[in-house]
Image (tube, rainbow, N blue to C red):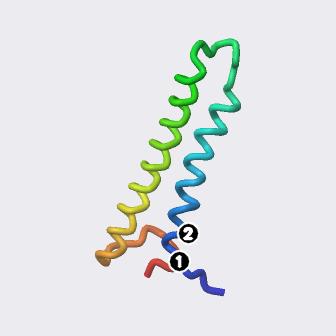
Amino acid sequence: MRYEFKALEELGWFVFVAVATVVLQALVEFDPSRVDDWRAWAVGVGAAAVRSGAGAALAWLGKRAIVDEGGDAGGVAGAD
């Protein structure tokens, strides 16, 4: 069985996992007694999630640029 690389789905899952990791970490470490401003807390968690998702997307796009130029796929199955 050969794995067929699907770029959009791979990118979507990569970003989703990065964002979910930030949100879950915020929920695990959540202590309502330490939150003074709920809006600032929500904006902070949202901004961290967006930053994490954007970083994942940029890392993925950079890896795809290397593969598209004929470089080493770095172990990406189906990228050859």
Residue lying farthest to the front in this orientation: 39
The crowd level at tag 2 (other Cα within 10 Å; few <14, some 14-19, many 20+) is few
> Residue sitting at 43 percent across and 60 percent down?
60
Residue 18 in the image, given as x and y percentages of width and height: 55, 48
Query: Is 26 on the left-hand or right-hand side of 50?
Result: right
Q: Foreground residue, 3 or 57?
A: 57
Q: Quadrant of residue 4?
A: bottom right
Measure the alpha-carbon separation of dots 1 and 2: 9 Å
Element on which disc 2 rests: helix
Q: Residues within 10 Å of mark 1 (few under 14, many from 20)?
A: few
Amino acid type, mark 2? Glu
Question: Where's residue 64, x and y in %?
Answer: 39, 68
Task: List the residue tagged with mark 2.
Answer: 9
Q: Position of residue 1 (x, y in %)?
A: 66, 87
Pointer 1 residue: 5
What residue do we see at 38% from left, 62% from top? 61
Which quarter of the rendering shows the C terminus? bottom left
Percent x, y of residue 7? 49, 72
Q: Amino acid at mark 1?
A: Phe
